[in-house]
Amino acid sequence: MQALARALGTDPARLLGIHAPEQDTLGAEQLRRAVRALDLPDFAEPIEVLPLPELHDAASGAWSDYLAGRHAELLAGLPSLMVDTRRAVHVLADDHAAEAAGLLATSYRLAAGLSGRLGLVNLAAHAAHRALDTARYTTRPELDEAAALRYLAWVLVRQGDLAEAERIAVRAAERLDGGLLAKPDADRIGVFGSLMFNAARAAARAGSADRAEDLLRAASAAATRSGTDRVDETGVFGPRVAAMQAVDQAMRTGQPDRAVQLASQVPHAAGAVPAFWESGHRLHLAAACADLERWAEVAEHLDAARKLAPQWSRVQPLGRTVIGHLVEHRGRRSERITELAAHYGQP
């Protein structure tokens, strides 16, 4: 399937019917305008510029919505955050302007992540480039640049530009690695690990399974060194997150039995792990169990994914595909399966 996808210049997930097509969404036009707008002061007077503490609170709230899978709320609030932070960048000076630029870079990265998850991959790529352009003006340009490249690599994987995605992710991770060896830093480790995840995913989809394993091992070593699952805007990373990524990678490379075996070795969270990560992990396990015809476990994982992140899981094509297989083999003979079919949009 991977060889066929490469020959056709597409993603294996599209051939399997588990990849959302690029589509517009209610409210996405406002996000599109906000991302594509020039970095102008938006005709704001200084008195109209929100104080930096309020902008920090707004950015923190947007990030919390993203982590919780509350994409409708994020879609509604993110365009205003971009406008407000752009105004602050133009009105403020010196360190305050750099601080505002950091918040603007954050909003662009959130726009990249949200757009990609809504299937708007071209908009996601544009937002990632805007985050990269803004990074040079922040208080921590090296780290913000690496974080922007993490999102860009993630988008390139979704666009099928796998060689470029791996190259960008690995080079950005290599630039951070010196700092990791010299002095452990949670933010740098988080970005490093996320970059390696994206590089491994690109390698796996390009058919380089051994290369993907090597990249995941490097990420896992960094996760072990960190010792804590940590969630913030620089990355989602830690021992449990790295182990979950290995499970998901096994499933993506057509090894459902190995995915289930690795899942039994995933450690408990040593800190915070986002609900939609946990939900996505359960969806991959549901798909693995469906391949192995372990239908009771399929239902368990689908139900867990639904409860962990209701809004996010409802729109995942993988969930719709797996519940379709479950209904085909088990029928709607129970209230639970009927509820799952309704949640995942199975007609």
Image: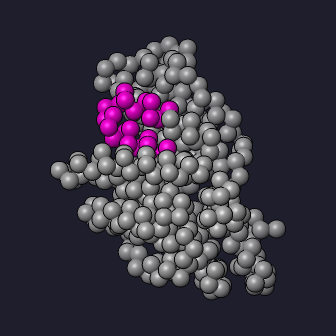
Residue 4 versus residue 26 in the image, above or below: below
User: Which image quarter: residue 300?
Assistant: bottom right
Residue toward you, 294 or 196:
196
Residue 267: image location, x then y, percent: 37, 75
Residue 111 versus residue 312 in the image, above or below: above
Residue toward you, 247 or 203:
203
Residue 216 in view of the camera: no
Residue furthest front as drawn = 7
Task: Read off the magenta span.
Answer: 130-152
Give me the residue at 35% from left, 61% from top: 219
Q: Quadrant of the C terminus?
A: bottom right
Residue 135 placement, left or right of 24: left
Residue 28: image location, x then y, percent: 67, 39
Residue 186 in view of the camera: yes
Q: Is residue 142 magenta?
A: yes
Residue 276 versus residue 253 in the image, above or below: above
Residue 70: image location, x then y, percent: 58, 52
